[in-house]
Amino acid sequence: MRDPRINAAALGVCGRLAREVAGLLNLEVRMSDAVADTKLRARRRSLHIEPLESRHLMDAGGAASLISAVWFQDVSDHADVAHAGVADWTVESDVASGQAALTAGQSDLYDWIVQFDTAAVAGVASVAETASLLVGGGIEFEVLRGLGLVGQVLVRSSDASIEAVQSLLSGNVNVAGFEQDAIRQVDVTVPTDPYYNQLWGMTAIDAPDAWTITTGSSSVVVAVIDTGVDYTHVDLAANIWTNPGEIAGNGIDDDRNGFVDDVYGYDFVNNDGDPMDDNSHGTHVSGTIAAVANNGVGVAGVNWSSSIMALKFLDGNGSGYLSDAVRAINYATMMRNQYGVNVRVMNNSWGGGGYSYALYSAIEAGNNADILFVAAAGNSGSNNDVSPQYPANYSCSNVVSVAAVASSGQLASFSSYGATTVDLAAPGVSIYSTVPGNRYASYSGTSMAAPHVAGVAALAFALAPDASVAEVRDAILGGAEPLAALSGKTAAGGTLNAYNTLQLLDAQPPQGPVIGSLSVSPNSATLGASVALVAGGLADATGTITGVYVSWDVNNNGQYDAEDPTVGGTTTIVGNEATITLDTNRFGEGTHRLFAAALDSNSHWSALATTFFTVIAPDDHGDSAASATAVGVPSSTAAALGVAGDADWFKFQAVAGKTYTFTTQLDTLSDSVLYLFDRDGARRLAYNDDVRYGDLSSRIGWTAPSSGTYYLAVAGYGNYYSGTYSLNVQIDNSAPVLAAIGDRTMSHNETTLTVPISASDADGDRLSYSAQALSVDPLARQAYELDREFGLYQWEGSFWTNLRGENEKYFAGYYNGARNPYFILPDGDLYRWGGSIAASTYVATLNAEYYSNPFLLCEAQPPEYTPIDGGDVQLSISGGELTIARAADFADDFIVQVNVSDGVATDSEAFSVSVTNFAPELASIGDRTMSYYQTTLVISVNATDADGDRLSYSAQALAIDPLAQQAYELDQEFGLYQWQGSFWTNLRGENEKYFAGYHNGTRNPYFILPNGDLYRWGGSIAASTYVATFSVDYYANPFLLCEAPPPTLTSFRSGAVSVSMAGDVLTISRDSGYTGEFFVQVHVSDGVNTSGETFRVSATGAASLQSVALAIELPSLALGTMSMAGDAPSDLPDLRSAWLTHFADDRFGRGDDVVQAANLLASRISDSTALLHDDVFARLSPPEGSPTGMEGAAWDELVGQMLAGRRYENRLFSDRLATDRDAASEDDASDYGFGQWGLLERSAIDLLHDSLSEQLTSPAISV
């Protein structure tokens, strides 16, 4: 909608030019279809530079002050030829001296600036057509170009004098005015800048006198809110503000203020940190404020050393959005409030649009921060009291609205005015200043007047750093030089006077210390980092500063009070600056206000200086290429932008020719921007904001030109956003595949092992191999594998314990796809439940730690692999073979991991290497027998060792408790057990103890008597069946029988048997009188492992009667009960022969005497425990040729008598015989049928000793 107040009829302009004029004056700007930041933006009100007033000498009527692009047309081919007669006004040429070039013209060629009458140009359609308005009069004119103002052209006359041309033009009714093109020079000698003489405004505001008081201070920052600033301009670069908390060009918001690389300010048009001027307006304004003085080039500003903060919100066409203006103003306020930047003035040479509460609020926020807001009154030539111009008309108390005056002291024809809304005027016509590209030019407008005021304000704040905005504003208005032409036109009724302003401040040198500036670098830091607080501009007119001390506004009330702690201080002053290091841990996360005060030698304190800084949470990823987080390819990395302005940097390895895709996956982060940087981490290769319309994540596809490390950075769009996201890195690549490698073994004698390795790659990429040796806790690895196999987990929140009395702990798992309980015993044995403890299946053995904490098994973590020291295991790969070299003294098992890579993707294979030492194997020896006459047995032992180790041998003789053996065998045979929880006692009066067992498959009671005899119950004591005889210990504790353990071998304690080894030859020796069974255990060892073989040795022979008696009397000697060996002794023929020999001897007498002797012998051994096998004697027939008396009944009588004897009641048989012998000597020998003891000894004792005893051996011993 066009402004109805501005139209072509009102201006008296018609035709094409009228339409052009109306378009130029329209305050609404059509939104461009494509905006620089690629975001879709709604149509918004546009703000413009105030239209510049063209330089002209005459009043041309209504249209004469209008600028049109049509009227900039070049017409003549000679337009670029040096001007005739005199040089024109120019910007800086290429001449090295910087002076404008002057080229002498040809004779009678003169250039003229002609302003045609409004009515005359109403019917022309172009600059060229104005030539028709000069026809006639005899002088030829060539139209060279239009100068921009409607009806204003540059023409060239030829072959006519100056006077003739002036006479002709004066009489031309189409010409409203004219002048010869010329150069104006102003003779001012200070400062020394070559173009200073063109700065009439400096003299007009009495700047030279003001400079005798102060030329400004770099500590005072002026924010130029405009089209940007050429911060490289030779006359501005030294006075451009530089953000102390930002590092240029690293793509990171170093100071965490929400803006990346805002080194000199910010570009709100393109949303980046480069506020370079692409119009010239902002650079021109900046030169007036603070162009460097006395540097031998160009011009000088009002303030020679102020700092210009470049805030660009207007584009190259001089148009911008209201929202960006608000952002720019708020940025300047934020930098003062929160980051300690001493912004005291904002210059605003722009206007347009109506009232905006958002803009008002931004200005008011600056007011609250004590920042002066200087605004151009406008170039509409209207009364702002009636027709408000914004932002100049805002009622904020920090606003200074500035009109423009010409060098004549008159209000410029284009300047807006207002007795109540425009404060004062300043030079604004033909103002010469800096423009981009190290050039200079003259502009006119209130845009040029405002920076004069801003510059003076900067001088005032330099002179009086503690002055308030109100004080400086009052001084500026109060110091205005009255002009009659401005009476009723401005509130002050005069023009700006710099000297008067400074005088009115009445600034005296401060008494005591002064802190000129206070800042923290970096202004935003991660928790845990250190920051430097810098107190600059330290001065003391009356003493010496001895220290600077810092307090923290801990209660955040904006005032220093007793609660605010001192957080740092220093007594070291370097030059006019003090630096104090602060630890951010003291403050915690958030934005914090700091107060600083200086103390001098007179005990005077300075006024408090204030600054802010922000502490943020530790960043999860680096903020620069130097601290970038390495990510794999492919990979997905979780990340977070902790605060607005944060950026996360990542690095990855790229392979030449491979294609990569990088994407952000947004979580709480609303909008991301993704950047790709070259290997230097500085040159940007690509970036992406949005994947597509409606998808605010980011995506970059890229093919690596060369291999190396490249960098990615992720930021929130416009540095506004924070939140969580994931960075995904993908590659178009097939990973190599490493062939399986099985587990390996190494003999402990081997120190080198070679393993073949191979891999394939579908892309045909060149492959590289690597390997490492690792150690791992074998139990942790076993637990992890068991947990993965069986899915073990705690069952219903508990490890159920001791449900079956074994202190077992239960948990759940799976087996064959079905859930199944598992339990672990205190010793670490793991079982799968099978219905009972006994029926459960053994799974594995861990240790007691896993019993104490079953979570080590149920939630087993992957085992930790630790690299093995290179001195123990060394690996090398060459020609498809992996060589493992093991130190000879390193015998632990280990893991080898082999990796293959194509430069992007990797495959791995791990296998175990077991260092083995196989135990030697001893060949079976087998049981052996030592005959009657054999006292030594020699056996060659045979053993083998798979490792070829040297072997050593050892041997020992062992014995076994025969009663324990007997108890074990009976318990195994009859299944004896306690009956109903008790050993029932004395049920039949014999003090017998009962228990249960089985016989022939049927349960049957058993009992044991106090003397150790064991019986199977037969209905009564007498009818019960004798089973075996034990000692009284078995009666005292029947559990020795009912739960009889397997008998154990013990050392052979008698000296009757010895064994020895000589190499692999075993020698077994026994005493000649010893018979019985014993065991020999042989061991063979390779120094680490041992194998053994145990075999039985049966020693047979004639045992002496004394040894028989000892065996009966002292069973603890392990000689056992004497019995016949076997059912059919092999030497029965010898036994028969012995009988014949003895009984045929003439000394025995008649056969009946022999019978009597045999009867006597049988009676004497009737109580012996010698158990003679019934079947043996039953098969013994009387020997052929035996005495007649031994046939038939005599032989049977002998056998029967010998079989009748069962027990020997604890007396030695030899003693009984001795007693009998003595009795025989006393009795008549005829009572026995033979008269001498010798006959008894020969026929009885020798008979038993030499014949029968040959068959008496020790009982069989079994394990």
Image: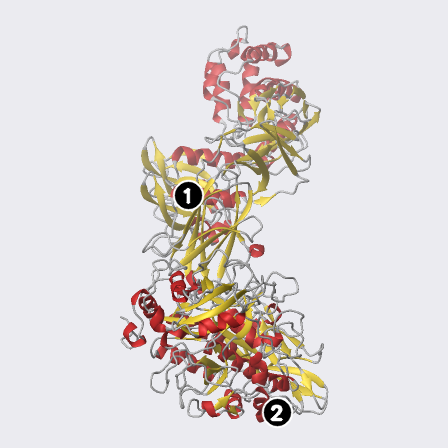
Q: Residue furthest top?
A: 1185
Q: Nearer the viewer, residue 1244 or 363?
A: 363
Mark 1 vs 2: CB contact within 8 A: no
User: Which SS class for mark 2?
Assistant: loop
Spot occupied by residue 72 in the image (x, y as percentages of width and height): 43, 64
Identified at 33% across, 44% down, the residue is 820
User: Which numbered disc, 1 or 2, marks the residue closer to the eye?
Assistant: 2
Q: Amino acid at mark 1?
A: Arg
| Residue at (49% x, 79% y) in the render | 428
Whether residue 763 is visible, yes or no, is yes
Which residue, given by chain and number where applicable, does mark 2 sit on? 507
Q: Position of residue 4 (x, y in %)?
A: 27, 75
Q: Is residue 217 above or below residue 480?
A: above
Judge left or right: residue 568 versus residue 743.
right
Q: Against 596, is 154 above or below?
A: above
Residue 918 seen in the current view: no
Residue identified by numbered label 1: 788
Disc 2 packing (10 Å; few <14; some 14–19; many ≥20) = few
